[in-house]
C-alpha cells in the first residue's frame, strides 16, 4: 500500500513542474512520502479551497507551493490551512521571477509563507526545509538529512580548478 503523503507539493501550472520537480526529487531521495498536484489560485480556485481545507485532515504535515507571475497560490493556501506553507517563486519570462518573489514574500501579518529563492534552487531548498521540519519528530529522517549534508560537503573541493 502506498504510504500516506506527508508533504504536499502544489503548483499553479504544468509549466511549473520543471522547477517543482526539484522539491520532489529531494523528498524522494530522503524517503519522505509526498504528492504533487496542479492547483491554480486563479484558474482552479475551488481546487485550491478544497486542497487547503482538507490537507491537514488527510495527514499532510507541510505544503510546498510554487507559482510564477502574480503568484497568489502560496499565500492563499496559507490562509486556508494551519499547516506550514513553503513558497517557491517560479522564474517568470517577463520579469525573471522577481514578480513571483514579491507576490509570495510580502505576506501581511498573520499568515506567513516561508519563501525560498527564485527557481530550481528554491524548489530544492523547499524540499530540504520540509524534510527538516518533519525531522524534528523523526530521528531516522534526521539521520538521513545529516548524511545528505555530509555527502554534499564532501563533494566540494577545497582547491579550485584553474583553467
Ligand atoms: C502561474 O502562471 C503559474 O504558476 C505559472 O508559473 C504561470 C504561467 O502559467 P502557464 O501560462 O504556463 O500555465 O499561475
Image (spheres, grey):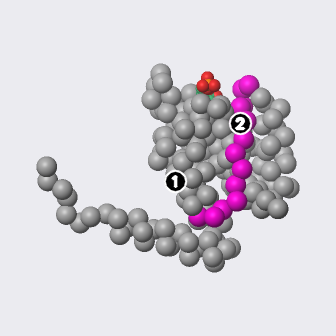
- Which residues make up the magenta segment? 30-43
Whether residue 16 is visible: yes
Whether residue 74 is visible: no
Above or below for 110 versus 68: below
Above or below for 139 versus 85: below
Magenta stretch, overall SS: loop
* Sequence-first disc among 1 and 2: 2
- Choose between 86 and 163: the one closer to the eye: 163
Does 84 appear in magenta?
no
The residue indicated by pointer 2 is: 38
Residue in the picture at 71% in, 32% down: 40
Above or below for 111 versus 14: below
Does 39 appear in magenta?
yes
**Which labelled disc corresponds to residue 113?**
none
Residue 112 x, y percent position in the rendering: 64, 48
For label 2, the SS is strand
Above or below for 57 versus 13: below
Residue in the picture at 59% in, 35% down: 16
Residue in the picture at 71% in, 36% down: 38
The residue indicated by pointer 1 is: 125
- Horizontal side of residue 160 vs 112, given as left or right: left
Q: Residues within 10 Å of mark 1 (few under 14, many from 20)?
A: some
Amino acid at each position: 500500500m502506498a504510504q500516506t503523503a506527508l508533504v504536499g507539493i502544489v503548483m499553479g501550472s504544468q509549466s511549473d513542474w520543471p522547477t517543482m520537480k526539484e522539491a520532489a526529487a529531494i523528498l524522494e531521495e530522503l524517503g519522505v512520502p509526498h504528492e504533487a498536484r496542479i492547483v491554480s489560485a486563479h484558474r482552479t480556485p475551488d481546487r485550491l479551497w478544497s486542497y487547503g481545507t482538507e490537507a491537514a485532515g488527510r495527514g499532510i504535515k507541510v505544503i510546498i507551493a510554487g507559482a510564477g507571475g502574480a503568484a497568489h497560490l502560496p499565500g492563499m493556501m496559507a490562509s486556508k490551512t494551519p499547516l506550514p506553507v513553503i513558497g517557491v517563486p517560479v522564474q517568470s519570462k517577463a520579469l525573471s521571477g522577481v514578480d513571483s518573489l514579491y507576490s509570495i514574500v510580502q505576506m501581511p501579518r498573520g499568515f506567513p509563507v516561508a519563501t525560498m529563492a527564485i527557481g530550481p534552487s528554491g524548489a530544492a531548498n523547499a524540499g530540504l526545509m520540509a524534510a527538516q521540519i518533519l525531522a524534528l519528530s523523526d530521528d531516522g529522517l534526521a539521520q538521513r538529512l545529516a548524511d545528505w549534508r555530509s555527502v554534499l560537503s564532501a563533494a566540494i573541493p577545497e582547491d579550485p580548478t584553474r583553467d
